Amino acid sequence: MTGYLMQRLLLMIPTLIGITLIGFFIMRLAPGDPAELRAAGGLGAAAGAGISVEKRGAVDEAMAQWRAQFGLDKPLHVQYLVWLKNLATLNFGESFKDSQSVWGKIAERLPVTIKLNLWSILVVYLVAIPLGIYSATHPNSFSDQVTTLAAFILFAVPLVWAATMALVFICGGDFYYLFPPGGLESLDYSESWPLWQKFKDHAWHLFLPVVLLSYDGLAGMSRYMRSSMLEVLGQDYVQVARAKGLPEKVVILKHVLRNSLIPQVTILASILPGLIGGSVIIETIFSIPGLGQLGFESVLARDYPTVLALFTASAVLTLIGILISDLLLAAVDPRIVFGRRQQ
Amino acid sequence: MSALQLSPAAVEEMALAEPSASEGLWDDVWKRFKRNPIALTGFYAVCFLAFMALFADFLANDKPYYLQYGGKTYFPIFRSYLVGAKLGQWPAELLNVDYKKLEGATAIFPPIPYRPSNINLLEPLEPPSAKHWFGTDKLGRDVMAGMIHGSRISLSIGFVAVGIAVVIGVVLGAIAGYFGSWVDLVISRLFEVMLSIPTFFLLITVAALLPPSIFLTMAIIGMTGWVGIARFTRNEFLRIRNQDYVTSAIALGVTDRKVMFKHILPNALAPVIVSVVLGIAGAILVESSLSFLGIGVPAELVTWGSILHEASTTTFAWWLAVFPGFAIFITVLAYYLVGEGLREVLDPRLRGLR
């Protein structure tokens, strides 16, 4: 196992290089010059669209200066190597937008996103696994059909629709005001509130985002759980276990559950990027100051250093998630042999 | 033993029965698929949506099917296809006219007599009424017309994107799972890169950086969406390649390609098919999220996602939120139901459970 772990850690190096290459070159090869955009933003604020020739010259000069400051005038591969070198020392550079340190911007918003996603993952697993087990052990019963249908319906509800409906109907849009339409705490929030009131305020604000972020992972996970349980239940060894007189509880929880958790283990790794994507939508809609919102704003502003940093950071996090899930996979399924094909 | 001894006539009968039993795999699939009423409902919904997308021009159009004007008879919708194909021209008296205001004309209009591009600034944000079944948006465009024509964009993006994803995913997954060793190692690095990239974030980035276009959107959704299919295929191949029947096929000297695609793939198909059908729905979801965020598809095109976006920025227009979102929901649900129905039919290990 240790040897395998070392091998995997070494193999992460080419993967990391692949990730940074894809991220870096997609962002640099795309049309749209950040200097141009920055200049346009400044001009828009100062004088509007119409601009005289003399002023244009001054702007060009400022743009050239700015490009030199951020190293944008060097060839692409040099830019890449410089960025990679900085990355190795965890220096993500400065934002194009406001010249703040990218690391600082991320650190400021990280806790919000982590809080949101941890709650969502917790909700997903705590609800989905028992639901899947129940569904599979009572196949085609009335309650199985109801949960199956409910999961399907939930899974098919588009996140953007659910969020918009929530905004329109229960967040003080046109009808009821049950939940806040955005933010993480009330306007009059103060540190001097009693603990219970603080908690209540946070819960009130977090409730909708967490529900919206977790419902589709929950539905999908319970589906996968059910189908992999059913698949295992159909195998001979389960019949053997039953035939030799094991109590049904032991058959299900000990013999079937372990084998049917295998697909869930692969999903564990893939749930992370999905949550990051969901965070972009939810944080943008509910104006929650997390990484998703930062990412979307930075993309629109062509703030390359910030976008690249977020991209790389979430990729590395997911990479670690995959490693853990593969190790778990080997632990729960001895049939899966890593390495050479057995001839 | 005696029970297994068959008369020559019975053997002959079985030999004769064999081809008809094996020729109809898809007949068989359809026969058993039909027995599941929920999946069948999903299938009909998929057909209905395809019909709506195909005949959008005949369901929502500002041109009439049939027009009698100035003593002549016209079929303007059909004619618009001829003009589009450069096979005909508009007669001078019908060039850029508003058909609803032609005097002394008899015309039969489609059920929704608007196109999504018909801007009417006199009727902004009208609630649903007999005139505009699903209301109008800020620019006075009919929401129902926009939704009918929007189904074309959603469905075509779903199909093309998943087509791209399936080809890449199945081939790479099969190669990695079958050959193992260093091939698997290299391809798995690629999976790992694609899998650890935050796909939706990458999509947003690429879609926001490139000029808005339907075809680019299809391509990037497809090129980022194959990893799930590939992983499932690889895992199935990994599992199956050590089974006895594969070993014996290899021992018999069957070529690698044949073993992979003829012997292993059919058994690996069940989880792949689920992810393919989910993939179509997923691509439709992604497209709607992208147009909700205002990127990907050109802004002048009305899509389900773009109407939803308007709903989230407009107060007191609930119809903008309810109907297009419901359309996405029904479409996605229909594909899920079909996928699930197919899985239960195609997976031999589940046979007899139902």
Image: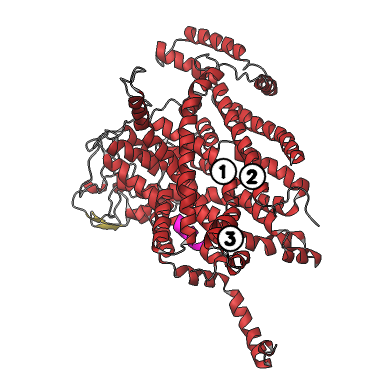
Of all residues, the one furthest to the left in this rendering is B104
State which mark lies toward you, 2 or 1. Answer: 2
Residue type at the position of mark 2:
Leu
Instruction: Tell me the CA gap for discs 2 and 3.
Output: 19 Å
Magenta region, residue range: B336-343
The residue under the point 32% across, 45% down is: B95
CB under 8 Å between callouts 2 and 1? yes
Label 2 element class: helix
Q: Which residue is mark 2?
A: A328
How would you rate the neighbour count of disc 1 (Cα within 10 Å): few for under 14, some for 14-19, many for 20 or more?
A: some
Say if B198 sits above or below A42 in the image.
Answer: below
The residue under the point 38% across, 52% down is: B330
Q: Earlier in the sequence, mark 3 or mark 1?
A: 3
Chain under callout 2 = A
Q: Earlier in the sequence, mark 2 or mark 1?
A: 1
Task: Please say whether residue B241 is one of the residues in the magenta stretch.
Answer: no
Label 1 element class: helix
Q: Which residue is mark 3?
A: A232
Say if A318 sits above or below B278 in the image.
Answer: above
State which mark lies toward you, 3 or 1. Answer: 3
Q: Which residue is mark 1?
A: A268
Quarter-of-image position of residue B10: bottom right
Quarter-of-image position of residue B221: top right
Instruction: Tell me the CA gap for discs 2 and 1.
Output: 10 Å
Q: Locate the N terminus of chain B by quadrant.
A: bottom right
Q: Which mark is residue B109?
A: none
Residue type at the position of mark 3:
Val
Residue A86 seen from this side: yes
Chain under callout 3 = A
| Nearer the observer, A297 or A238 | A238
